[in-house]
């Protein structure tokens, strides 16, 4: 039985009548960009995350650029970003005029930590982009304690949660108050690209923050640097969410927690069917309740496994085989001799295998059997 890498159809199928009604409502209303659906979605997502403000934009890449600019990042500044993440986490930095500075990640959680960020700090560091990679929240509290503003890149982590810092190493404390991924940084960013945990039917993104000034700056920046479409106070962007996507996201948002439960259940199916005996399983950040966007295992034979699984009809993909400090476009910001050994090792050994809110025990068993056969 083939098992796809992800499934963007089955989870939303039961919501079809509500989606049809939401789309019809927008068509009947005649407002298509930054209208009542966008305002309502921003309110509803802010309530879900437990933050004061959500500012929607056109995609998750713009969200990072705008978040950095709203924090005051500009020419001459440095922004620390992990080298093991999607390209956009770093690509979003140069449009602010600042320079990306690459840091390493933790081998188990695959996220940047306070220690890996600290190693990249200089007097010019003005912000950190900390990525909740693969749906696993980074240790944002410890990174914020370094004293530099943090943009939490939560593009992959909608539906994930993180316990209090003191939960580290103490499972009982991890049962304390949980904060949403997206409520952890000075400002957080989301992508609503269709394959994301909360994905619309096109491009979309958002910033989330408790800070009134950051939210206000982001609202100005997303609309050409203007508050009133009459006077233009800075060079901004044309980066807006449209009404159709907002109306769709309003239908999908109430399903997000159930989908995140489904992703965690899929991870349990993998563990229960013996995957951990064959490859190294992803490790949650202490105190975290991840919403596995991708299920990324590690193996010294990752390339071979990727080919064998693909041949067997099982979705498998190495997402970041060429890490960011080795990408041609980012070479101007890579100092000679930069050593990021954990990133290099993960780039070689990571492999995403099927993950979705509806991946059941039988499908997990198929995947594990195929992995076993490939590595025999
Ligand atoms: C970690 C991370 N950051 C940023 C982005 C950019 O989001 P978008 O594709 O909506 O611009 C993505 C999306 O793939 C991502 O995975």
Image (tube, rainbow, N blue to C red):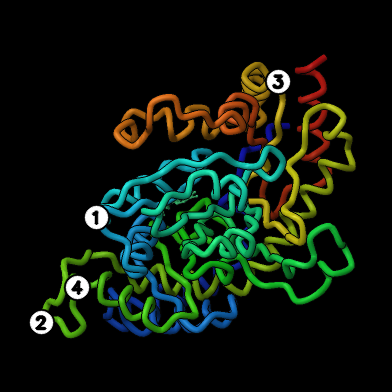
CB-based contact (under 8 Å), mark 2 and mark 1: no
Mark found first going from the N terminus, 2 or 3 = 2
Q: Position of residue 375 (x, y in %)?
A: 78, 17
Asked whether mark 3 lies closer than 8 Å to ligand 1, one says: no
The quarter of the picture where the N terminus appears is top right
Crowding at label 3, few (<14), some or many (≥20) Cα neighbours within 10 Å?
some
The quarter of the picture where the C terminus appears is top right
Q: Secondary structure at mark 4?
A: loop
Q: Residue at x 48, y 32 (%)?
A: 323
Q: Which one is nearer the viewer's eye here, 331 or 266?
A: 331
Judge depth for marks 3 and 1 and give the one in front.
Answer: 1
Please tell me in which quadrant of the rendered image residue 308 appears. top right
Mark found first going from the N terminus, 1 or 4 = 1
Q: Residue at x 63, y 65 (%)?
A: 141
Q: Farthest residue to the left: give it.
A: 230
Residue for badge 1: 75
Residue for badge 4: 225
Judge depth for marks 2 and 1 and give the one in front.
Answer: 1
Residue for badge 3: 300
Q: CA distance from mark 4 to mark 2?
A: 9 Å
CB-based contact (under 8 Å), mark 2 and mark 3: no
Identify the mark at residue 218; answer none if there is no mark. Answer: none
Crowding at label 2, few (<14), some or many (≥20) Cα neighbours within 10 Å?
few
Q: Secondary structure at mark 2?
A: loop
Residue for badge 2: 231
Q: Position of residue 101 (x, y in %)?
A: 41, 43
Judge depth for marks 1 and 4 and give the one in front.
Answer: 1
Q: Secondary structure at mark 1?
A: loop
Please tell me in which quadrant of the rendered image residue 26 appears. bottom left
């Amino acid at each position: 039985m083939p098992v796809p890498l992800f499934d963007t159809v089955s989870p939303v199928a039961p919501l079809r009548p509500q989606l049809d009604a939401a789309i019809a409502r927008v068509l009947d209303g005649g407002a298509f960009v930054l209208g009542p659906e966008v305002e309502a979605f921003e309110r509803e997502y802010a309530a879900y995350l437990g933050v004061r403000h959500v500012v929607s934009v056109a995609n998750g890449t713009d969200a990072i650029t705008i978040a950095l600019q709203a924090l005051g990042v500009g020419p001459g500044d440095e922004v620390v970003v992990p080298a093991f993440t999607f390209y956009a986490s770093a690509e979003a930095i140069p449009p602010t005029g600042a320079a990306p500075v690459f840091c390493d990640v933790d081998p188990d959680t695959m996220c940047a930590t306070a220690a890996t960020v600290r190693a990249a700090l200089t007097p010019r560091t003005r912000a950190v982009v900390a990525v909740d990679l693969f749906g696993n929240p980074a240790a944002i509290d410890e990174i914020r304690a370094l004293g530099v503003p943090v943009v939490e890149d939560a593009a992959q982590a909608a539906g994930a949660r993180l316990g209090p810092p003191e939960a580290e190493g103490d499972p009982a404390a991890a049962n304390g108050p949980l904060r949403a991924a997206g409520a952890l940084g000075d400002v957080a960013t989301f992508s609503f690209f269709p394959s994301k945990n909360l994905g619309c039917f096109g491009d979309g993104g958002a910033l989330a923050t408790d800070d009134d000034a950051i939210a206000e700056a982001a609202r100005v920046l997303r609309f050409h640097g203007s508050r009133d479409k009459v006077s233009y106070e800075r060079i901004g962007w044309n980066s807006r969410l449209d009404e159709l996507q907002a109306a769709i996201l309003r239908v999908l948002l109430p399903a997000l927690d159930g989908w995140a439960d489904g992703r965690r259940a899929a991870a349990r199916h993998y563990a229960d069917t013996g995957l951990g005996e064959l490859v190294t399983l992803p490790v949650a950040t202490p105190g975290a309740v991840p919403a596995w966007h991708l299920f990324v295992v590690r193996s010294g034979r990752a390339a071979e496994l990727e080919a064998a699984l693909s041949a067997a009809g099982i979705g498998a993909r190495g997402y970041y085989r060429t890490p960011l400090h080795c990408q041609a476009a980012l070479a101007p910001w890579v100092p000679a001799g930069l050593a990021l050994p954990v990133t290099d090792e993960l780039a070689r050994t990571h492999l995403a295998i099927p993950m979705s809110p509806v991946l059941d025990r039988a499908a997990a068993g198929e995947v594990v059997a195929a992995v076993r056969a490939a590595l025999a």
